[in-house]
Image (spheres, rainbow, N blue to C red):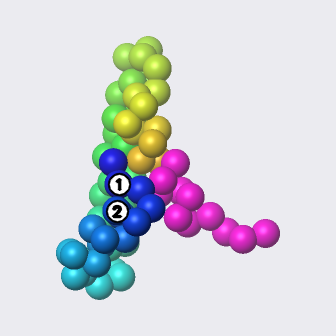
Amino acid sequence: MLTGKSRAAFRDRLEVDEATWERGQGWALWKALVVCAGAVRDGDGLPADAAFVLEEILATHERPD
């Protein structure tokens, strides 16, 4: 999982525009939600990796108060 400077370096290295980056985050969000839904359906706990992805994506889109 990428955080902080490594995420910024990864994004810079990809050389993608903002729309492409946002679509990638949308895909990651969708995938994490699918994993979470499967865990809920099966009665399992929330998978740590899916929870991390959700927290990271949502943190980048938090609205200021």
19 is within the stretch colored magenta: no
Q: In which quadrant of the rendered image does the C terminus lie?
A: bottom right
Q: Is residue 10 above or below residue 1?
A: below
Q: Amino acid at mark 2?
A: Ser
> Who is closer to the viewer here, 14 or 45?
14
CB of mark 1 within 8 Å of CB of mark 2?
yes
Q: Is residue 33 visible?
A: no
Residues at marks 1 and 2, CA–CA distance in whole angstroms: 6 Å
Place residue 35 in its image quadrant: top left
Q: Which residue is mark 2?
A: 6
Vertical arrangement, residue 42 with respect to residue 19, above or below: above
Secondary structure category for the residue under label 2:
helix
Which residue occupies the extreme left position in the image? 14
Q: Residue at x 20, y 75 (%)?
A: 14
| Stretch of the chain drawn in magenta | 55-65
Residue sticking out furthest to the top: 43
Q: Tag 1: Cα neighbours inside 10 Å, few (<14), some, or many (≥20)?
A: few
Where is residue 17 drawn, in percent x and y? 29, 84
Q: Residue at x 34, y 62 (%)?
A: 6
Q: Nearer the viewer, residue 54 or 40?
A: 54
Q: Few, some or many C-alpha atoms within 10 Å of disc 2 (few <14, some 14-19, many ≥20)?
A: few
Q: Is residue 18 left or right of residue 59?
A: left
Q: Which residue is mark 1?
A: 2
At mark 1, the secondary structure is: loop
Task: Residue 63: say if magenta.
Answer: yes
Residue at the location (31% across, 71% down)? 9
Q: Percent position (x, y) of residue 40? A: 44, 24
Q: Is residue 50 above or below residue 22?
A: above
Q: Residue at x 45, y 42 (%)?
A: 52
Query: Which amino acid type corresponds to the residue marked 1 in the rendered image?
Result: Leu
**Residue 10 picture location, percent across and down:** 27, 68
Q: Position of residue 50 (x, y in %)?
A: 39, 38
